[in-house]
Amino acid sequence: MTQTDYEQQKSDHFSWVQWINLSMDNAKEFYEYVKTNLQEITSQLFSKASKELFFLISKLTSIDIFFGSITFCIMSLASLFLASGLGLIGYQLFLWIKNGTWSEFAVIEVFNFLFENTLVAQWLSKPESWFGLQKIVEWLLKNIPLSVALIAPSIIILVGMTCLTFIALTFRYYQFKAQEKI
């Protein structure tokens, strides 16, 4: 191999530094291309979504708004119970960190506070019938933690109402679109 052939072959091959620099340049170019296209797609998506949302809101009737308000109130109440349950867990954690013992709060404590001197409380303490049911209710009230009794139903209600709202709005949207075509 002659010196000129060697120099020609050497000039045809990249060193690893040149290869990395070229790859980085290509990666930067690709990143800018993706970034530009994603910005454009996102812009178009938000524009279309806001247009369709405005269409839906403009077509809602007073009955839709009434039921939406009821749904909002139910979800707010469920959120309040969820926050209370999480707050109770936070309080229990605080007491545990402070004292080193876990403080238990069962549903029976709230039951006794709310139903003191009522027929239900009297039946629970001295049943005259339905003895099996009294044992089940008493066991549940003593063994279910208050935080679980607050959090679990709240999450179920929030998820259910969110799904119901999504389904209702989707149904109304397609109703309005069908009416618009007529």
Image: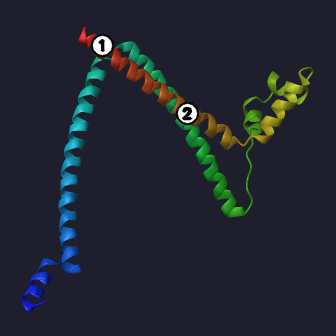
Q: Residue furthest top?
A: 182
**Quarter of the rendering containing residue 50:** top left
Q: Are marks 1 and 2 in contact (CB under 8 Å)?
A: no
In the picture, the quarter occupied by the C terminus is top left
Q: Which residue is mark 1?
A: 178
Q: Secondary structure at mark 1?
A: helix
Q: Nearer the viewer, residue 60 or 169?
A: 169
Q: Nearer the viewer, mark 1 or mark 2?
A: 1
Residue with the mark numbered 2: 78
Q: Nearer the viewer, residue 28 or 59?
A: 28
Using the image, determine if residue 106 lies above or below residue 54.
below
Could you tell me which residue is drawn at 54 percent across and 37 percent down? 80
The N terminus lies in which quarter of the figure? bottom left
Tell me which amino acid carries mark 2.
Ala
* On screen, residue 42 above or below 14: above
Nearest to the observer: residue 175 or residue 133: 175
Query: x%, y% of residue 54?
Result: 26, 26
Q: Is residue 179 above or below residue 15?
A: above
Residue 71: image location, x then y, percent: 48, 24
- Identify the amino acid type marked 1: Ala
Residue farthest toward the bottom in the current orientation of the protein: 3
